[in-house]
Amino acid sequence: MIRILWYIVIIAVLATGAAWLADRPGDVAVVWQGYHIETSVAVAVLLVLAVVVAALLAWSVLRMILRTPDLVGAATSGRRRARGFTALSRGMIAVGSGDAAMARRYALEAGKLLGREPMTLLLRAQAAQLAGDRKTAEAAFNAMLEQPETRVLGLRGLYVEARRKGDLANAFAFAGKAAQLDPAVGWANEAMLEHLGAQRRWRDALDMLERRLATGRMDRDLARRQRAVLLTADALDSADTDPDGALEAARQATKLAPDLVPAVALYGRLLSRQGALRKASRVLEAGWKQAQHPEIAAAYIDMRPGDSALDRLDRARNLQRLTPGHEEARIIVARTAIDAREYDRARAALEPLLKDRPPARVCLMMAEIAEHGPAGAGAVREWLARASRAPRDPAWIADGVVSDHWEPISPVSGRLDAFVWAAPTELLGAHPTAWTSEDVIADGDETMAAGDLPGLEDAAGAPAPSAGRLIEASVAATAGKPSPAAMAAAAPPPERATEARGPSGAAAPQPPAGAGTTQQAAAGPAAAAGAAGDVATGGAGEASPRPRVVASWPPSEVIFPMAHAPDDPGPVADDDEGSPQVSRRINL
């Protein structure tokens, strides 16, 4: 729109000038070297304009002729750079697809066409890394140090190569240089935090965190969390040597991260050591509302040394009143009630937790309660057996390592704030879809044929049972060798035995060893029941400490040798030889 307006204005000006000249006629005479030229003013103006245009055109042609070598060179260079960037792009694609040969070829081509372009050095280094040529990769990264724009990138590559070789000293030296050049670089700061954390130099790590935060390129919530973790680590190390400094560090950590359990528990303990019991109670109660954790409960219950077991039980019940109905509160009350020999109260606290699959520590506490109850040794053994199959209790986990206490850094990767409070991975009792062949963890041996599973029809006959069907396992509860009647009752009927062998009369094929199957599951219900009887009666075979499971889908029968139902352990005498058989329904 602006251009159109300008065109209109220019045309209007020219038209106005032409009209002005037409209204004012006149003659122009030129006398030069004996020549006398006369013409009108309008013609003279047009001649001047034509001469100017011709001069401009002549100058343009002359200028183009003079610049021809430069234009040809620029065109050639442009085509060369275009080819170079094409090779660079294809080389990056080859690196991403894992084609080491093509990546190396395009890296050489890009280097010839583009020279020491920063991206060509990066492609050369990545192609060398992909091919396993460490020396070439290090040479490319060292070449990057010569250019300011790629210096941090070169330090990053040298850091990675040093870590691969196990040269931690040089690796952290490269990370330190990168952190000095650019304090906001994440990987360099994380590496230095790992290095300082391994040396337990928490104050130096705090200073580095402050410098990174001052750049304004770090998330403030992450900075608060990391600062709280570092302060907690410093307080833990100086709790005995510098109680006042540790108390201040723990206070700041609790203020920065109220849900950081180690900081809250340590702050409460340090306050109780100095006699500030009321303040310690308020801190620990507030922390318990944020996170119902055993460490906070232990610091709250043991806040005053020398208290009786009943006083400790009262404080545990106070925590339960703060979070009524919470599982951890019930467990804490039960634990302190057992210590106070209030076994009925402990049983009442644990009763709501026995409906589903209680964790191992609940089963162990029930065994301790049963030991002092009328049920006797039979119930104790029952709860101990149930504890061996119970879900694992939560613990501090970092990079697959389970620890009984919190640490500020991971012992595997050195990562700050890596420990989380969670239950370790449990294979038994996992969701059934974890065993399907479509899962990434499957190796192709998990799925079994229908004829290999006991009690299933042939694949061409009746459909396989659906997931979650109930399996009833009858297990002998006697202690000793099973009677002939029990062995006869455990044997399958003839038609079922024939069916287990397959329609052609041949023995059903055994599942592969890598599938995690057992001989009892492959041989049919009789062998499985016999194996269960051996475990329950202590026969010739060695008793297995936990049931063996067929890793297949649909799941096969899993028989747990239990003398009594775990949810109702009754009195069992030591000389009870004629206990009836107990059926246990297990939902897979």
Image: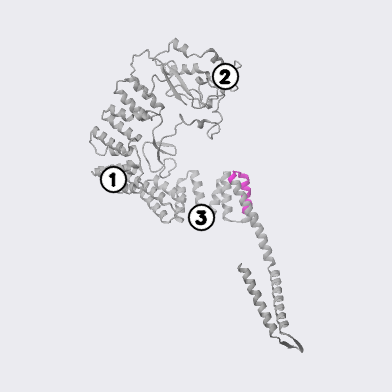
> Which residue occupies the foreground of this view, 352 or 261?
352
Which residue type carries mark 1? Thr
Q: Secondary structure at mark 1?
A: loop
Which residue is at the front of the view, 173 or 366?
Answer: 366
Kindly report the distance in space between the C-alpha atoms of the residues bearing marks 2 and 3.
Answer: 67 Å
Within the image, what quadrant is residue 480 found in?
top left
| Majority secondary structure in the magenta region | helix
Residue 25, located in which quarter of the rendered image?
Answer: bottom right
Task: Give the image location of residue 502, x and y in percent.
Answer: 58, 18
Q: Is residue 107 magenta?
A: yes
Residue 114 position in % (x across, y down): 62, 56
Figure check: 65 above or below 143: below
Of residues 188 and 448, the one nearer the viewer is 448
**Label at residue 151:** 3
Q: Earlier in the sequence, mark 1 or mark 2?
A: 1
* N-term mark: 2 or 3: 3
Which residue sits at x=49%, y=13%? 491
Q: Which residues are the magenta region?
A: 96-111
Q: Find the distance from the CA under tag 1 to the CA under tag 2.
A: 70 Å
Q: Amino acid at mark 2?
A: Ala
Residue neighbourhood size for the residue with mark 3, other residues' Cα within 10 Å, grouped as few (<14), some (14–19), many (≥20): some
**Which residue lies under the disc numbered 2?**
508
Is 461 above or below relative to 95? above
Was residue 492 drawn as part of the magenta stretch in this picture?
no
Q: Amino acid at mark 3?
A: Arg
| Count of numbered marks | 3
Q: Residue 430: percent from the left, percent from the top?
A: 47, 31
Closer mark to the observer between disc 1 and disc 2: 2
Q: Secondary structure at mark 3?
A: helix
Label 1 to label 3: alpha-carbon separation: 43 Å
Q: Which residue is under mark 1?
A: 241
Q: Are marks 1 and 2 in contact (CB under 8 Å)?
A: no
